[in-house]
Image (tube, rainbow, N blue to C red):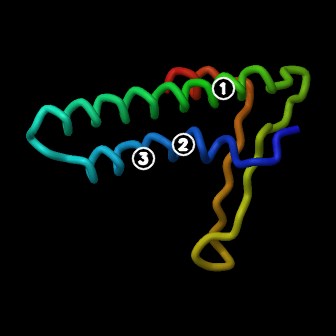
Amino acid sequence: MITWPILSVVTFLPVVGALLIYASRGDDEPARRNARWIALWTTLITFVVSLILVWRFDPAQPDFQFVEKAPWLANSITYHMGVDGISLPFVILT
């Protein structure tokens, strides 16, 4: 069983990569090269983490898997994520 927030990592790691690219902006060639490397590594890490989802997914279980739930902003608003058999291929496509 995976105890770390794997769906949040797959969801928000591209945002972190985009912020890093934005922070390292510039018009010179080293800045462009750094942006390409950051984009490449962010994409590869996100893809590998999404493959972990596929390998650890149990198709015999009909419920949502890798569920994350946390209170957010107020008591009535919660952050709730999960993946099922239909949405799993879409995670890989992104």
Going 70% across and 48% down the picture, which residue do you hit? 5
Tag 3: amino acid: Val
Residue 53 or residue 28, whichever sits in front = 28
Q: Position of residue 1 (x, y in %)?
A: 88, 38
Label pair 1/3, CB-CB below 8 angstroms: no
Q: Which of the two marks, 1 or 3, is nearer to us in this view?
A: 3
Residue corresponding to mark 3: 15
Label pair 3/2, CB-CB below 8 angstroms: yes
On screen, residue 80 above or below 50: below
Tag shown at residue 11 = 2
Going 76% across and 46% down the picture, which residue do you hit? 67
State the SS at label 3.
helix
Tag 2: amino acid: Thr
Residue 48 or residue 10, whichever sits in front = 48
Query: Could you tell me how far apart the alpha carbons at marks 1 and 2 are, in whole angstroms?
Result: 13 Å
Residue corresponding to mark 1: 88
Going 28% across and 53% down the picture, which residue do you hit? 23
Label 1 crowd (10 A; few <14 / some 14-19 / many >=20) = some
Q: Is residue 58 left or right of residue 66?
A: right
